Structure formats: C-alpha cells, structure tokens
Amino acid sequence: MSRVPPPWPPVEVETAHRHPDAPPPGTKFGPHYAHCFGCGDEVEHGLHLQTEAGEGTAIHAQFTVTEAHQGAPGLAHGGLLACAFDEALGVTVGQQLRRPAVTGRLETDFLAPVPVGSTLHIVGTLDGIAGRKVYASAEGRLDAPDGPLALRARALFVIVDFRHFVEHGRAEDLRAVAENPSLLRQSRFDINP
Ligand SMILES: CCCCCCCC/C=C\CCCCCCCC(=O)SCCNC(=O)CCNC(=O)[C@H](O)C(C)(C)COP(=O)(O)OP(=O)(O)OC[C@H]1O[C@@H](n2cnc3c(N)ncnc32)[C@H](O)[C@@H]1OP(=O)(O)O
C-alpha cells in the first residue's frame, strides 16, 4: 500500500489567518467544557488534554496516556489517540479563528506505538480555509516536543452557527449548562444567544 498521502488541503484554499483577538503565544487555554472527554476536568478517565497558543496559527497540546486509555496491554488505544487529535485540532480552529466549528472529517496516521505512561506532544496548525471549510493538521511526538514522531492527523472542520449545539445537544445537558454556565469553562459559548 502506498504511504504517499493525497494532496493536502484537497481543495483550493485561502490562507487561514489567526483572528486579531486570538490569544498570544504561550496562553494556556484550560478546558472548554467540564464534561468534554478530550479536555474536561470533571471526566475522571478523560484525556485531560492541555493546550496552549503557539506562534502563527499553531496550538501546542499534551496528554499523558494512562491505564484507562489502553487498547493492547500497555499501549494506547488508537481511537483515543485520534480523539486527542480531534480535540487539539478543534482547539486550533476554535481559538485561532475564534469561530465555532465541528469536525467533518479526521484522518490519522499511526506511525509508532504509544505506551502507557508516555506523554504525547501535539502541534496543530491551520492549513487553509475555503468558505465554511477549515483544513488543519497536526503531528504528535513521544515524550518531548522533539521526540520521535508517533502520529500525524489531518482534519476538515466546518464552521457552524452556535445554534448547531443548541439544536442537537441533549436537553438535560443543555439545561445543566444553562443552570451552571461555569461548566463551559471558557465563557465564549453562549447556549442561549
Ligand atoms: C466567538 C467564538 C469563539 C470560539 C472560541 C472557541 C473556544 C473553544 C475552543 C475549542 C473547543 C472545540 C474543541 C472541540 C474538539 C472536538 C471537535 C468535535 O469532536 S465536533 C463533534 C464531531 N463532529 C460532528 O458532530 C459533526 C457532525 N456533522 C455535522 O453536523 C454536519 O455534517 C456538518 C456541520 C459538519 C456539515 O453539515 P452542513 O449541513 O452544515 O454543511 P454541508 O454542506 O454538509 O458541509 C459543508 C461543506 O463541508 C463539506 N464536508 C462536510 N463533511 C465532509 C466530509 N466528511 N468530507 C469532505 N467534505 C465534507 C461539504 O461537502 C460542504 O462542502 P461545500 O461547501 O459544498 O464545498
């Protein structure tokens, strides 16, 4: 099987520029939602991905693989690694463009096994924008920002209206957020605008 990936981005794009209000490099973001599996601080066995703004459109993210994240004995489950990239790239798009967006497509190349106890260092960047379509990609390295390359991911995010979340979210969870807005750890998401 050829390992040569198809052209990326797959369509003609404009350069994606960071929004003037995007936080400066070094800003730590914290979780965006307490119950988010990728970053939430109230999800016991979640990924607890830590994210921080980088230069340009980059985001730096890290998470440590725990026993709860195993697929094979002592190795991270591939789906959870893909989840980490979904989250990291979602933060890249959300924070650098300051627009709500959801994942339309996510592809992941698993280049090396990721053992329990290792810390994955992810860098995500924006690759271009075409209307509502935002293309972003990321690399993940083992145990150090310049450690061995373990994963690569590419994703299409689609910019949506905030109504997307209100119309599709389960009513009791939306109610819980309305009653306790601090569950949205970053107050930018207003579920009742
Ligand atoms: C002031 C604001 C500040 C914000 C600050 C933010 C701070 C917080 C930071 C960060 C937080 C975020 C962290 C989250 C991280 C995790 C993210 C996730 O896991 S998201 C959940 C999983 N994804 C879904 O549940 C989507 C489910 N899918 C849908 O709802 C729809 O399919 C949707 C919205 C993706 C598209 O539906 P349509 O009806 O709106 O639009 P259509 O026309 O179908 O698609 C638009 C374009 O995209 C292409 N497209 C869509 N899906 C595609 C695909 N799979 N492959 C290729 N192209 C696709 C289409 O072909 C179309 O392209 P053409 O405009 O015609 O050129």
Image (spheres, grey):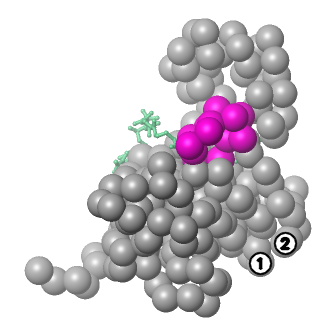
Q: Secondary structure at mark 1?
A: loop
Residue at x 55% of width, y 20% of height: 169
Q: Is residue 26 toward the left or the right of residue 163 in the image?
A: right
Residue at x 84% of width, y 34% of height: 187
The earlier-in-sequence mark between 1 and 2 is 2
Neighbor class of circle 2 (other Cα within 10 Å; few <14, some 14-19, many 20+) is some
Q: Report x, y in % for residue 22.
A: 83, 59
Q: Which residues are magenta?
A: 33-46
Q: Is residue 6 toward the left or the right of residue 80 in the image?
A: left
Q: Report x, y in % for residue 109.
A: 34, 72
Q: Are marks 1 and 2 in contact (CB under 8 Å)?
A: yes
Mark sitting on residue 55:
1
Q: Is residue 24 toward the left or the right of residue 63 in the image?
A: right
Image quarter where the C terminus lies is top right
- Amino acid on which disc 2 is placed: Pro
CA gap between label 1 and label 2 equals 6 Å
Q: Secondary structure at mark 2?
A: loop
Q: Is residue 39 magenta?
A: yes
Q: In the image shown, does 95 or 122 lie closer to the viewer?
A: 122
Q: Could you tell me what secondary structure mostly forms the magenta stretch?
A: loop
Quarter of the image where one finds residue 107 = bottom left
Q: Report x, y in % for residue 95.
A: 73, 54
Residue at x 53% of width, y 80% of height: 141
Give the total number of marks visible in the rendering: 2
Q: Is residue 76 toward the left or the right of residue 100 in the image?
A: left
